[in-house]
Image (tube, rainbow, N blue to C red):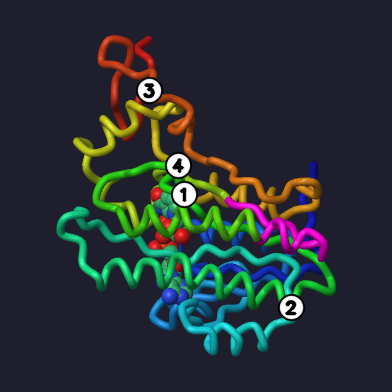
Amino acid sequence: MVLDFQGQTAIVTGGANGIGFAAASQLAASGASVFLFDLPAENPAQAAARFGGQGIAVDVCDRASLAAAFARVPAPDIVIVNAGIARQEALLDATDELWRRTLDVNLTGAFLTLQTAARLMKNKGGAIVLTASTNSWDGEAALTAYNASKAGLLGILHTAANELGPYGIRVNAVCPGLIRTRLTESHFERSEVVKPYFQQIAMGRGGTPQEVAAAIVFLASAAASYITGAALVVDGGQMASKFGPWSEDNAIFADGRWRLKT
Ligand SMILES: NC(=O)c1ccc[n+]([C@@H]2O[C@H](COP(=O)([O-])OP(=O)(O)OC[C@H]3O[C@@H](n4cnc5c(N)ncnc54)[C@H](O)[C@@H]3O)[C@@H](O)[C@H]2O)c1
């Protein structure tokens, strides 16, 4: 199966880093004309230049900022709604500020992006992919606002897939597990954190942005032409089981991952 995006315009929010950057790079490598939308401080133009794309400074929380950015690009065929933040605060200590900011970026920002995009795509069709999370279901501690925002994305996903299907617009989501990006780098650097965490993951390790990007690109492509409203978990098997397969009896943890003893 060859994924070919020649002649298609793709927009990736939060595309200057991590999962978004990996998805944008893969879309560009498969022929798409790619625009990164990201905060000015992330220098999206410079990031996009690394793969021959273009970058535009956007705050997804701001409808006017989004409208101005969409006005500068051709009507998109593909929109990856990916911008997000994650900050930890225990439920009992969580502040209004963190709650509002997280919902603003992760949920309102996704709604504004999707609605602006869909209005431009309704006469031509296309594909929208949301970056949700295993935390759309999982009650991981100290992430109340994040978990609520990612659960909310599934509500947007299902409703948008339903309402936009008649316009030929497919809407899907990826739900990554623990992926190594700057958002999670501090976890990956601490063996005492990832060793027990990865014990619960069938693949015995965390994921890479490229592995999530591959799922995003598939869902955006013609290969997924009969898939809409789907939430594709990309988590190495984390959500498939309550208790993972790895133990000190059968495996060793080295170089950031579990491997069976030989
Ligand atoms: N890394 C993981 O383990 C993981 C797991 C599940 C879901 N996710 C989700 O994947 C997405 C990408 O995260 P990542 O891990 O690549 O982190 P990242 O920090 O590398 O990338 C997030 C990007 O979003 C941008 N962004 C934040 N606020 C924005 C705003 N208001 N307007 C425009 N852009 C904004 C950031 O500048 C950044 O470039 C997020 O939605 C995140 O919640 C990540």
Q: Amino acid at mark 4?
A: Gly
Q: Position of residue 23 (x, y in %)?
A: 58, 58
Q: Residue at x 29, y 25 (%)?
A: 253
Residue beneath disc 3: 244
- Decide: few, some or many residues near mark 2? Use Cα within 10 Å; few <14, some 14-19, many ≥20: some
Residue 170 lies in the magenta stretch: yes
Q: Nearer the viewer, mark 2 or mark 4?
A: 2
Q: What separation in Å lies between label 1 and label 4 (alpha carbons)?
A: 13 Å
Q: What separation in Å lies between label 2 and label 1 (alpha carbons)?
A: 27 Å
Q: Residue at x 21, y 57 (%)?
A: 89
Residue beneath disc 1: 133
Of labels 2 and 1, earlier in sequence is 2
* Contact between labelled residues 4 and 2, with CB atoms less than 8 Å apart: no
Q: What separation in Å lies between label 2 and label 4 (alpha carbons)?
A: 33 Å
Residue beneath disc 2: 120
Of labels 3 and 2, earlier in sequence is 2
Q: How many numbered marks have been drawn onto this rendered protein structure?
A: 4
For ligand 1, tell me if the residue under mark 1 lies within 8 Å.
Answer: yes
Q: Position of residue 15 (x, y in %)?
A: 52, 67
Q: Amino acid at mark 3?
A: Gly
Magenta span: 160-173
Which structural element holds mark 2?
helix
In depth, the one of 210 and 255 nearer the eye is: 210
Q: Amino acid at mark 2?
A: Leu
Label ID, residue 207: 4
Q: Amino acid at mark 1?
A: Ser
Which structural element holds mark 3?
loop
Q: Position of residue 182 (x, y in %)?
A: 35, 58
Of labels 3 and 1, earlier in sequence is 1
